Image (cartoon, rainbow, N blue to C red):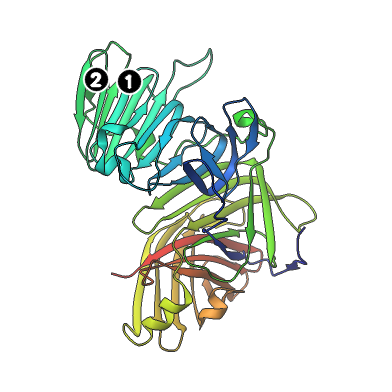
Amino acid sequence: MFAKLSHLSRAALFVVAIIAAGFSNALYAAGGKFQFVTGDVQVLNASGQQRVAKMGEPVTQGETLISGKPALAQIKMDDGGVLVLWPNSRLKISVYQYNGKLDGTERAEYALTQGGVRSITGEIGKVNRANYKMQTPIAYIGVRGTDHETVFIPQPATGEIPLGPPGVYDKVNVGETFLQNQAGQVVIMPNTVGFAGSATAMPGLLPGIPEFFNAAPPKSKASKSGGGGDAAAKQNIEFSPPPTPATVVAYTTNVGGVSGTNASFDASAATLAQQGENAALGVNWGRFDGTYTVAGEVAPTSGSLHFMNANNATNAAALTALGSTVVTASYSYVGGTAPTNELGIPGIMNSMTANVNFSTAQITGMNINFDTPIGTNWVVGGSGSFTEFAGTGIVLSGTCSACTLQPATGTASGAFVGDNAQGMIVGFGVTAGANSAAGTALLTQP
C-alpha cells in the first residue's frame, strides 16, 4: 500500500531510498540473496515452481534464475561472491555448498544455458579454486580468483538474430580463467576474451573484445511473459532509516515525477536502453526508454526512466567522523546514464562536480554541464544540506541555451557511497519552459 504521494514540477524528480541489506537472520540453505532486481526476473526451483525474484529474498542450490527482456539482477552469495545476470539469460545454481568457513567441502557450480552473467568470485573461487566452475552446454570455465563475464549464445531459431556467432565466450576483467571443453583448454588473462564454438572445437583467444561486452547488454522490448512468468518489470522503492550496510536505489524521470515514502514504477512496456556499473564502489545504473507508469500518476508516461543503485551507502556515523578528519572534499563525474531531454533523446554529460564540507554537512557547490539534442546546452548548479540532498533535493538553477524560457531550474538528490564517502550517486532533473532533462551520475573523489 502506497503512502500519500505529492506531484512536483515538470522538472524530473529523483527519489532516493535506503533499504536494509541485512535481512532476517532466519536459517536458510546456503546460496545467496538478491541485492538488486529490475525488470522481469523469475526463480524456478527444483520442483518446477516459479516465483518473482525480489530484492532481499534468498536463492539456493538447485534453483534457476531466468531474466526477461529487459531485466537485470544482482545476487550476493554467502561466500562474498557476486553474480550479475544479464537480460534474456538463464543461470542455474547447480551446486552451492558453503557453511561459513573454508574446510574443503565448499563448492560453487553454475550452469549458464542462455545469455550472460558476470561473476566476481568470493572465498570459494579465491581459496579453493578447483571447487568453482561456470558450466555451459559446450564448455566450462574455471578460475584463479577473478572477475569475469561469461556469455553463451545458442544456435538461433529461424529468423532470430543472435548477439554474435554461437558459442561460449569468457571475458576476464581481473584475475585469470581457463575455458575448457573436449578439445582442450585456453587460459584467459585480463582484457582478453576466450571463445569455443562447439564442444569439439579447440578453444582460443579472440583478436578483440566483441561489441556486446563493450556496450551494455543489447536493448530489446520488454515482455510481460519474458523469462517464463507474467510479472511486469517493476522496481519498488521504500525509505527507511540509513542502516549499515545499506542499498540505495534511485530513479529519475525526464517528464513529471512523484515523491513520498513509497513509490514504484512499471517499465514492462519500455526498453532497457543503457546500463553500466562501477564495481569498485558497488554502483550500477540504467535507463528505460518508452512507456512506463510511476505509482501515483494517473496515466502511463512516455520518456526516459533512469535508475541508479549502490549497495554500500555511507552511514551517518561515518559522515560525522569525516567532519573532524577530511573536513572538505571535491568530487567529479565518472559515469552514469546519458541525460535525456523531454522527448527521451539522450545527450552527453560534459562535466559534473561537487564540493562538500563534512564539518557543516553541506554540499557547498554542485555544478552540472550537459548537452541534449539538438544543440541545447544546460548549465545548472546549486548548494544545500546533506538532509536536503538525501530528501527532496538541493535546488538547481542556471541556463538552457536553446530553451524558450529562462531560467532553468530543478533539483539534485542522492547519497554518499563507500565506507568513507568515496563517491556520490546523484539524480538530477531540470526544466525551462516546455524543455526538460534528467539523468543520473556517479561522482568520486580523485
- Residue type (three-letter) at the residue carrying disc 1: Ala
Query: Under tag 1, what secondary structure?
Result: loop
Q: Which residue carries the number 1 mark?
A: 139
Question: Residue, x 51% and y 79% (percent of image)?
Answer: 386
Q: Mark 2: give few (<14), some (14-19) or many (20+) Cα within 10 Å.
A: many
Location of residue 292 with respect to 295 vertically, above or below:
above
- In this image, 283 relative to 129: left or right? right
Q: Position of residue 19 (x, y in %)?
A: 57, 61
Extreme residue in the right direction:
298
Query: What separation in Å lies between label 1 and label 2 (alpha carbons)?
Result: 9 Å
Kindly report which numbered mark, 1 or 2, lies closer to the viewer in this rendering.
1
Callout 1 touching callout 2 (CB < 8 Å): yes
**Residue sitting at 69 percent across and 59 percent down?**
263
Dot 2 falls on a residue whose secondary structure is loop
Q: Which mark is residue 263?
A: none
- The amino acid sitting under disc 2 is Pro
Q: Position of residue 252 (x, y in %)?
A: 59, 60
Whether residue 375 is visible, yes or no, is no
Name the residue at 30% across, 28% down. Answer: 141
Q: Residues within 10 Å of mark 1 (few under 14, many from 20)?
A: many
Asked if residue 230 is positioned above or below residue 340 in the image, the reply reads above
Q: Earlier in the sequence, mark 1 or mark 2?
A: 1
In the figure, is residue 55 to the left or right of 245? right
Q: 194 or 208: nearer the eye?
A: 194
Occupied quadrant, residue 209: top left
Q: Give the numbered dot on residue 203.
A: 2
Residue 415, image x, y percentages = 49, 69
Res. 176 in view: yes
Q: Quadrant of the C terminus?
A: bottom left
